[in-house]
Image (spheres, helix red, strand yellow):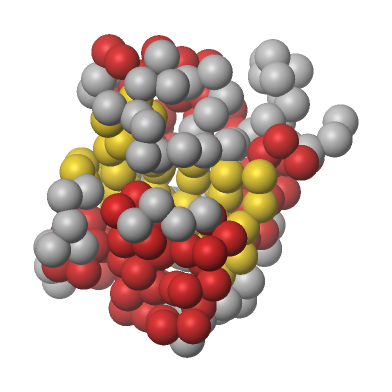
Amino acid sequence: MNYRSRNYVDLHVIDAIEEGILKSGYSEALMLRYYLKETNIHIVSHLAWDMKSLCRVITAIANYRPQYCAPRRAIPYLHLSCHGTKTGLYLGDSPLTSWEVLSDCLLPLQQLTDYNLPLSLSSCWGFYGAQLAYAISQKYKKPRPYHSLVGPMTQKGIGELCEAFGIFYCNLLVRHKSIKQAVAIANQQGKIDLNFTFGSEVVR
């Protein structure tokens, strides 16, 4: 995706960590604002604590900018911060959310952007979100669960993930490196193990 050519690229950061951490003042959206303070990246903060609240956030993102229905002009970039496993995500203090359930939640935003939604999972094992490719329902008119997905291959701490994603977004959205280059730079400078995949690689 050519982010340089779009009129609007909004980084929507969803904090979905458990209540205890949120009460302590932690916010990945705020941390990313700090790491990206020298850039002009437009960050929009959201909060979710279960699937119902995440679906409301997805609706709010879909309504944030009318131009999202023309993805060549404007695109929302979705960054979800939460705990995760190889089989799904923990939203707040809720039980494990499967990839199938997450896929259904993301569908309205996928439809709006003609299945061009870029997605980052800032969670342990976030790259395993690639399994969304095998979880999409027949409601999806295109076999594309995301435009691109970025996440760590293993268990990582919140701080190191946020720093690495800050490096990644700076290179992807400001310096306009390719996603492959941006991930490589983030891994080298952040000493982390982000990986990426494209939804167009999905074969049904």
Q: Is residue 64 left or right of residue 51?
A: left
Q: Going 66% across and 45% down the picture, which residue do you hit? A: 198
Q: Residue 99, relative to residue 55: is it above or below? A: below
Q: Picture coordinates of residue 31 (x, y %)?
A: 20, 67
Q: Is residue 89 visible?
A: no
Camera-nearest residue between 43 and 61: 43
Quarter holding the C terminus is top right
Q: Is residue 65 left or right of residue 1?
A: left
Q: Going 40% across and 39% down the picture, which residue do you hit? A: 3
Q: Going 43% across and 22% down the picture, which residue do you hit? A: 72
Q: Is residue 91 visible?
A: yes
Q: Is residue 29 left or right of residue 57?
A: left
Q: Is residue 58 left or right of residue 188?
A: left
Q: Picture coordinates of residue 23 (x, y %)?
A: 15, 65
Quadrant for residue 107, please give it.
top right
Q: Picture coordinates of residue 70 (x, y %)?
A: 41, 14
Residue sticking out furthest to the right: 204
Q: Picture coordinates of residue 153 (x, y %)?
A: 63, 71
Q: Going 28% across and 27% down the picture, which residue do you hit? A: 7
